[in-house]
Image (cartoon, helix red, strand yellow):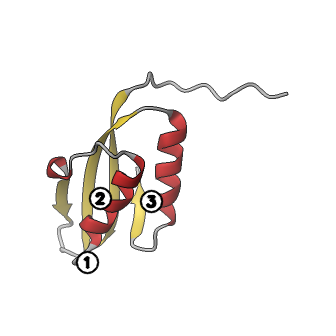
């Protein structure tokens, strides 16, 4: 029998996610839809966007109210596997 994985976070907590991808018209809306599917109380008005110097990439910061490690794991998995997303931190 294995022990449950311990988390260094105490839930619930505010947790910033940094998501980077190629600059596309619907990148931010697509990311927000994924985030809301895992964190329904996320307010899209709090989304921070920063384009890269050359303007080819867009970095988004979404701060969610995380309620569990499994919620964060599921959200990271879905964002990381999305074809528009290059990096999730």
Residue placed under numbered mark 2 in the picture:
32
Taking 77 as reference, is 23 above or below it?
below
Residue positioned 26% across, 50% down in the render: 61
Where residue 82 sits in the image (x, y, percent)? 46, 68
Specify few, some or many for label 3: CA neighbours under 10 Å numbering under 14, 14-19, or 20 or more.
many
Is 89 above or below relative to 54? above
At 25% across and 65% down in the image, what residue appears? Answer: 28
Residue 78 drawn at (x, y percent): 49, 59
| Of labels 1 and 2, the one closer to you | 2
Residue 53, position in %: x, y? 17, 68
Residue at the far right: name it.
1
Q: Residue at x 28, y 48 (%)?
A: 62
Instruction: Give how far apart the Cα atoms at labels 1 and 2 are.
Output: 14 Å
In the rendered structure, are the residues bearing label 1 and label 2 in contact, judged by CB atoms less than 8 Å apart?
no
For label 1, the residue is: 24
Mark 1 burial class by Cα count in 10 Å: few <14, some 14-19, many 20+: few
Q: Nearer the viewer, mark 3 or mark 2?
A: 2
Q: Name the N-terminal-most of marks 3 and 1.
A: 1
Q: Secondary structure at mark 3?
A: helix
Q: Nearer the viewer, residue 84 or 65?
A: 65
- For the residues labelled 3 and 2, the Cα–Cα distance comes to 10 Å
Q: Which disc number belongs to residue 72?
A: none
Do the residues bearing badges 3 and 2 touch, measured as CB atoms within 8 Å? no
Q: Residue furthest top?
A: 10
Question: In the rendered structure, which disc, 1 or 2, sits on the residue that comes first in sequence?
Answer: 1
Does 87 sit left or right of 81 as displayed? left
In depth, the one of 54 and 68 nearer the eye is 68
Picture coordinates of residue 37, whole percent (x, y): 39, 54
Disc marking residue 79: 3
Q: Residues within 10 Å of mark 2 (few under 14, many from 20)?
A: some
Dot 3 and dot 1 residues touching (CB under 8 Å): no
SS assignment at label 1: loop
């Amino acid at each position: 029998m294995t022990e449950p994985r311990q988390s260094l976070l105490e839930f619930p907590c505010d947790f910033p996610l940094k998501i980077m991808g190629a600059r596309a018209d619907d990148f931010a809306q697509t990311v927000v839809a994924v985030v809301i599917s895992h964190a329904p109380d996320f307010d899209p008005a709090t989304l921070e966007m920063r384009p890269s110097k050359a303007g080819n990439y867009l970095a988004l910061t979404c701060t969610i109210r995380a309620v569990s490690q499994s919620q964060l794991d599921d959200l990271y998995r879905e964002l990381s596997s999305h074809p528009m997303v290059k990096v999730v931190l």
